């Protein structure tokens, strides 16, 4: 049996809203009606996530910059010791850049092609390319170092070279190559030629390719009889309606959406979730799954061949992104959060949280 490295979840995928101002061809989330996360629910859940041992919160969507409270969410999460990450199509970044400055530890700008025509076509005809270039210049002028997130599809993989030469070499930023995945008839499969090309890119400086993704795809994805996925154990998924999504967002039509009624920690440790944990990756709909946002934390959950494949790229990313001193600062922030030195871990809304709720009306 593989040796487990963690007892509780390390990542929270926090869906602030399903709304989006783009319509990407490899995504269907923008088709959903959606509420927005409330401050009160967020503050209660944040305390529970800290107690559960979560280290990273991915503020996602939809387009997370649509939520007007995003800067507040990010700052509060950082003060409680979490590493924050946001991925944006950049349409709203020029308007919100100053409010977000310094609050996102891993800021990702989406770019999926080297030309406006190709990138905008992949984004449903929305003119994202122009906003990407404006956002990149603005972010760099503010001292931010966004990663460029390139979703690799059968139609755009040959654009990687041009994007690398135009945006990575001159800036020293990091290019994240994220293989597209299929779900609910959305997305596409990648050929061996594309997987081989991604393997070659994994060896280039300032490029992040998780080689465990490539290996898993070549082997047919998650096997329910020998599951790789630890979507429940390693990840907490929260919906805009304040629900715990099980086993993951992408299996919503087969899974459960449990209302979080004030105590996320008790819900996660409860009988229903713990029963489903024993079945994670073993459901029939888990067969062949290669969804990156759950496989990435799953590879780090226990010692296995995927752990070693993923680890090489992760350590290089950490070194190139933050270096030794920056990494130590992040660790120190997690160990000694600034919100009343972790008084916010208490089960009730304590003074700092009561204050911000009062101020927000």
Image: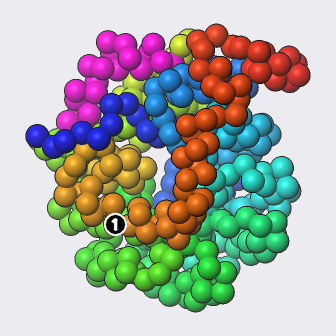
Q: Is residue 279 magenta?
A: yes
Between 127 and 94, the one lying in front of the other is: 94
Q: Which picture quadrant has residue 306?
A: bottom left
Q: Residue at x 76, y 71 (%)?
A: 140
Place of residue 90 in the rendered image (x, y in percent of width and height, measured from the top left)? 72, 62
Residue 356 appears in the rendering? yes
Q: Which residue: 24% across, 39% down?
A: 4
Q: Relative to 99, does residue 216 appear above or below in the rendering? A: below
Compared to 284, does 136 lie above or below?
below
Q: Residues within 10 Å of mark 1 (few under 14, many from 20)?
A: some
Number of numbered discs visible in the structure rendering: 1
Q: Quadrant of the N terminus?
A: top left
As drawn, is 7 to the left or to the right of 353? Answer: left
Q: List x then y, in percent, for residue 123.
A: 61, 65
Q: Which residue is mark 1?
A: 312
User: Which residue is more in the foreground, 310 or 31?
Assistant: 310
Q: Residue at x 75, y 20 (%)?
A: 353
Q: Does the magenta run of residues contain 324?
A: no
**Secondary structure of residue under mark 1:** helix
Q: Nearer the viewer, residue 25 or 84?
A: 84
Magenta residues? 264-283
């Amino acid at each position: 049996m593989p040796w487990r490295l963690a007892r509780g979840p390390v990542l929270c995928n926090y869906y602030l809203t399903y709304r989006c101002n783009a319509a990407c061809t490899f995504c269907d989330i923008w088709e959903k009606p959606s509420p927005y996360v409330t401050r009160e629910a967020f503050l209660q859940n944040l305390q529970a996530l800290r107690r559960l041992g979560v280290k990273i919160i991915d503020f996602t969507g939809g387009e997370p910059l649509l939520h007007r409270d995003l800067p507040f969410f990010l700052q509060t999460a950082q003060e409680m010791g979490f590493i924050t990450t946001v991925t944006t199509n950049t349409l709203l970044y020029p308007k919100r850049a100053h409010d977000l400055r310094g609050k996102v530890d891993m800021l990702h700008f989406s770019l999926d092609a080297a030309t406006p025509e190709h990138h905008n076509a992949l984004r449903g005809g929305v003119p994202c390319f122009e906003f990407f270039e404006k956002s990149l210049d603005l972010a760099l002028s503010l001292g931010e170092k966004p990663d460029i997130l390139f979703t690799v599809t059968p139609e755009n993989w040959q654009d990687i070279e041009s994007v690398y030469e135009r945006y990575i070499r001159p800036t020293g930023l990091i290019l994240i190559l994220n293989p597209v995945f299929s779900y609910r008839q959305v997305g596409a499969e990648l050929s061996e030629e594309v997987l081989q090309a991604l393997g070659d890119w994994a060896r280039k400086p300032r490029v992040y390719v998780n080689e465990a993704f490539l290996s898993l795809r070549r082997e047919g994805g998650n096997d329910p009889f020998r599951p790789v996925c630890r979507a429940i154990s390693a990840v907490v998924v929260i919906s805009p309606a304040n629900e715990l999504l099980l086993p993951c967002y992408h299996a919503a039509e087969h899974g459960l959406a449990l209302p979080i009624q004030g105590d996320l920690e008790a819900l996660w440790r409860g009988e229903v979730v713990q029963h489903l944990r024993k079945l994670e990756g073993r459901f029939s709909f888990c067969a062949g799954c290669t969804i990156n946002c759950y496989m990435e934390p799953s590879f780090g959950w226990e010692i296995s061949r995927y752990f070693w494949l993923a680890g090489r790229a992760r350590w290089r990313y950490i070194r190139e992104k933050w270096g030794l001193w920056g990494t130590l600062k992040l660790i120190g922030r997690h160990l000694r959060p600034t919100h009343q030195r972790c008084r916010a871990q208490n089960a009730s809304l304590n003074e700092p949280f009561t204050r911000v709720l009062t101020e927000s009306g």
